[in-house]
Image: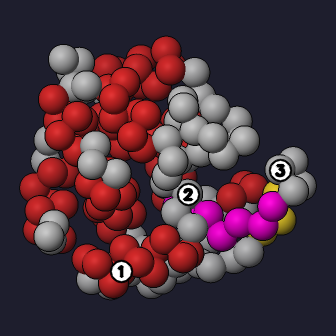
Amino acid sequence: MTTINDLREYAKNANVRAFLKAIRLGEGTFDEDGYFRIVGGGRFINTATHPRRRVYIARYGVYSTAAGAYQIIYRTWRGLVKNYGFTDFSPANQDLAAIGLIVEMHAIEDVIAGNLADAVLKCAPVWASLPGSKAGQRIEQYANVERTFINAGGKLA
């Protein structure tokens, strides 16, 4: 089983860090303020825990609790806390949580190897903005994801 220390080791990899940036592009949280963004554009300040704000997104006719740089919903966050022991919703733990989700989608080796297209497809069920997602929301163009990955220091296979 993957541990929080494993996630910290993955976080040192340039391709992993670049992939995190590429995810954030489509999630609308690319800037540093993205760590404090709630779905729909709201903000939160207290990172002691996930903000758990339920927001109605009229465009898609759904409610969401998505928050932070990776727009992690509260239910998913609870599972990540249980699996890895995160003690807060700080930017550092948001990054590690996203890496945990990449691991859970069996995409971490693809990310590290630079198999970006495969990693994107494997992670599309988690992040609705990634190409290949079936969530019915806005999807980022693959060319933009790839460009962001490369500009963030990622190396393709």
Left or right, 91 with reference to 72: left
Front-lying residue, 41 or 80: 80
Disc 3 or 1, which lies upstream in sequence?
Answer: 3
Q: Amino acid at mark 3?
A: Tyr
Q: How far is disc 3 from disc 1 in space, using C-alphas?
A: 28 Å
CA neighbours of label 2 inside 10 A, class few (<14), some (14 to 19), many (20+): many
Return the residue at label 1: 81
Q: Which residues are magenta?
A: 62-68
Mark 2 or mark 3, earlier in chain:
3
Return the x and y of residue 145 as percentages of the image width and height. Answer: 46, 25
Q: Nearer the viewer, residue 111 or 125?
A: 125
Q: Position of residue 4 (x, y in %)?
A: 18, 70
Quarter containing the C terminus: top left
Write the residue at 54% across / 76% down.
75
* Picture disc at residue 60: 3
Where disc 2 sits, the SS reads loop
Left or right? Give the position of 22 relative to 14. Answer: right
Q: Gap between marks 2 and 3, in whole Å?
A: 16 Å
Query: What secondary structure is found at the residue carrying circle 3?
Result: loop
Q: Crowding at label 3, few (<14), some or many (≥20) Cα neighbours within 10 Å?
A: few
Q: Secondary structure at mark 1?
A: helix
Mark number, residue 71: 2
Residue at image location 16% in from the left, 66% down from the top: 2
Around disc 1, counting alpha carbons within 10 Å, would you say few (fewer than 14), some (14 to 19), or many (20 or more)? Answer: some
Location of residue 95 by image quarter: bottom left
Question: Can you see residue 101?
Answer: yes
Q: Amino acid at mark 2?
A: Gln
